[in-house]
Amino acid sequence: MRAGFGKTDITPRVGVELYGFGPFLNRKSIGVRDILEARSAVFECDGHTVVIISLDLCAIHLRSLISKIRTIIRERHPELNDCDIMINTSHTHSGPAIHSRNSGWGVTDPPWLAILPGRIAASVDEAFGKMEPVKVFQAMVPCRHMGLNRVYDKDAPPLQDVLREDWEPAKPELTDTECRVIRFDSADGKMIGFMANFGCHPVVCCASNRYIHGDWPGVAMHNLMREFPGSVGMFLQGAEGDVNSGCVHKGEQESLLALDVFAARFANAVRKGFQTAEEVEIPFIRSISKEFFFQGKPVFSLEKLEEIQREQEAILFSENATDDNGECRMAAVYLQGIEIVKGILARGETGLREELHIIRMGDLQFMGAPFEIMQAIKNDIVAASRVKYPMVMSLTNGSRGYAPDNESLQGVNRIIGNGREGNYESIKVPLIAGQLPFADIHNELVRYMAELEHELDGE
């Protein structure tokens, strides 16, 4: 097998708004803590070439942007099909807004967005230009000190606790406790690239943070690339839908302190993977992608939407309403989502068609979906897979919100309310984004991934 790696700087100018943590926070950046990059790998075996791209960005909600990136790459490298190009985002909340939905979560910067596809494609061009024969090594290494399940465990523990070297969550079994590390060595034994697949929200830094960076995955990859000059490190986001970093929602100074600690923890796990990885043969490469239908849940009727609308308008029209009040800002977001969902109901839409994607390289299998996948779903996808080393990747080729597990889907008691209350991922976020909640996405994802794997095998 031949492989090549490339990277380009995609850091926006200082002053753009950052994405995440809440509505209309006006998080305009004031500096660059660490640059953001597009990092790309090109693999070729027996005449089949594929590209995997890792971006230090929160998520790409714009389908047109995914299409544009693929189109530019294919124009330059016509041997590729869309299914040969996989695009994954790390989900840092300290990067620029890049979306068409989730109004209020940061203002998108049009000049930067216009430049972005070409910069990403340039990293792929560089990878093509550096292709050479490689040996491939893989390891699964312990990584228990990074995150906790924010839905089924206690979120945001005290900082003094999570900074202890021996800290781990109360329920580690509800998180990723291991990280898949893949190392690519040139013929002379030099590591030219590496990948790390692990699921955890990059939210060590907080809502008050104004510095641009890739959070702990970006900092960890940069530290390792400096340690191994000439290598390109790619973080592939796993099932982070219900897993937060151990440090989250702290103050800015506390967060910046913890950022280096969590980046070092992850880098240590990846470094152990370099040391223990065993060689794997790559006799072939295959790729497949296909759209599947995800059924919506009939939570919102026109009457229910109008009821919610009246509730939110009452908040905005009260005597004490101000635009610096978080409840008022959220009410404004809900009202925008309500209008979009009304249009969905008027058109008679009942769900979404979304792309699932698999790239297989021998016993290594990359399985991507455009959702923030919860851990229980990932566990079932892995259990159903017949390949030796399956890797589940969230936020791949786009973003369409959370993929809640069955317990989250069944535990909804209220449509709208304060706090998480079990309905944040399954009800609130769809309304914020202006889409129908999912009815059965846990079982659908497991079934569809298995079907796609069988189709890849020609069955």
Image (cartoon, helix red, strand yellow):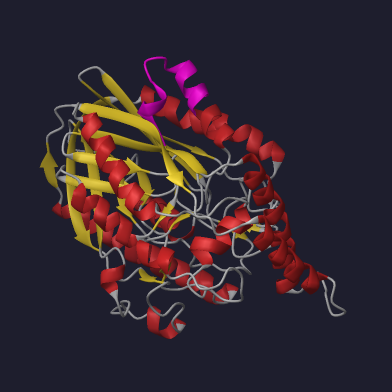
Position in image of residue 387 (x %, y %): 16, 42
The mark total stands at 0
Query: Which image quadrant for residue 117?
Result: top right
The one of 178 and 209 positioned closer to us in this rendering = 178
* In this picture, residue 45 sits left or right of residue 175: left
* In this picture, residue 408 sits left or right of residue 97: left
The answer to whether residue 100 shows anywhere in this view is no
Position in image of residue 91 (x %, y %): 48, 53
Position in image of residue 336 (x %, y %): 72, 55
The one of 251 and 347 positioned closer to us in this rendering = 347
Q: Quadrant of the N terminus?
A: top left
Position in image of residue 342 (x %, y %): 68, 50
Task: Find the residue positioned furthest to the right.
Answer: 319
The answer to whether residue 331 shows anywhere in this view is yes
Query: Range of the magenta residues?
Result: 70-86
The one of 431 and 35 positioned closer to us in this rendering = 431
Please determine whether, in this image, residue 216 is positioned above or below residue 171.
above
Q: Quadrant of the C terminus?
A: top left
| Residue 1 magenta-highlighted | no
Please determine whether, in this image, residue 77 is positioned above or below residue 222.
above
The one of 37 and 69 positioned closer to us in this rendering = 69
Please determine whether, in this image, residue 393 is positioned above or below residue 289.
below
Which residue: 58% across, 50% down? 435
Which residue: 36% across, 56% down? 239
Please determine whether, in this image, residue 133 is positioned above or below residue 146.
above
Which residue: 35% across, 48% down? 444
Which residue: 38% across, 74% down? 152
